[in-house]
Image: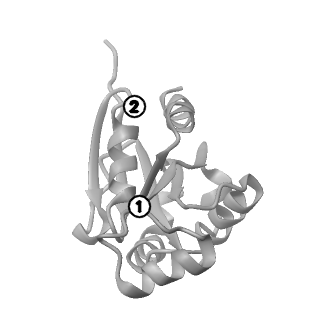
Amino acid sequence: MEVSMKTIIIYSTKYGSVEKAAQKLKAQIQGEVDIINVKNSPDFRDYDTVILGSSIYASGIQKEMKTFLKNNLSQLIEKKVGLFICAGNEKENEIATYIAKNFTDGLSEKAIAKANLGYEYDLKKFSFIDRLAVRIVGGVKESKSVFHEEKIKDFAGKINS
């Protein structure tokens, strides 16, 4: 009898790109996979694998995800864990730093999969301040959607093995 793995993807997002990345990831993961926004106080006790995803703003993950990590670290450390971010920065060394800096207390070291799965700038959804920031800091002048299908496939492969 084959035992089916249960995976939960818990995400935090400001404008929806992390939820899109989570859906793309779910399509590649074997077994039962649920996706839940961290704002909905997810209960992950019955899952074998926990994947955490957040967008990056000013080098940090969403406040709700930080709180979730702080409140659940001891249980998360006991699980098979994957970590992903959605960030417009494509520099691999900086991505590794973002993940290590934001998923602390041994979680980043324990994770079997870590990646930046892509990003999306939907300027119609952005606040004035966020539009201004991406224009000044990132030179973004128009909406853009970039999801790294190969990284998503590779991430899912690590979770599936």
Foreground residue among 60 and 64: 60
The quadrant holding residue 126 is bottom left
The residue depicted at 63 percent of the width and 52 percent of the height is 110
What SS does tag 1 mark? loop
**Disc 1 or 2, which lies upstream in sequence?**
2
Foreground residue among 20 and 109: 20
What type is the residue that disc 2 sits on? Ile
Q: Position of residue 85 (x, y in %)?
A: 52, 58
For the view shown, which residue lies furthest in the right direction?
93
The residue depicted at 70 percent of the width and 57 percent of the height is 96
Give neighbour class at mark 1: few <14, some 14-19, many 20+ (Cα, 10 Å).
Answer: few
Give neighbour class at mark 2: few <14, some 14-19, many 20+ (Cα, 10 Å).
Answer: many
Asked if 74 appears above or below 79 in the picture, the reply is below
The quadrant holding residue 90 is bottom right
Q: What is the C-alpha distance between the residues marked 1 and 2?
A: 29 Å
Q: Position of residue 95 (x, y in %)?
A: 67, 59
The quadrant holding residue 94 is bottom right
Q: Quadrant of the N terminus?
A: top left
The residue depicted at 44 percent of the width and 75 percent of the height is 62
Q: Position of residue 40 (x, y in %)?
A: 22, 68
What type is the residue that disc 1 sits on? Ser
Please give the label number shown on residue 143: 1
Foreground residue among 106 and 108: 108
For the view shown, which residue lies furthest in the front direction?
141
Figure colour scheme: one colour
Q: Quadrant of the C terminus?
A: top right
Q: Position of residue 48 (x, y in %)?
A: 40, 41
Please give the label number shown on residue 29: 2
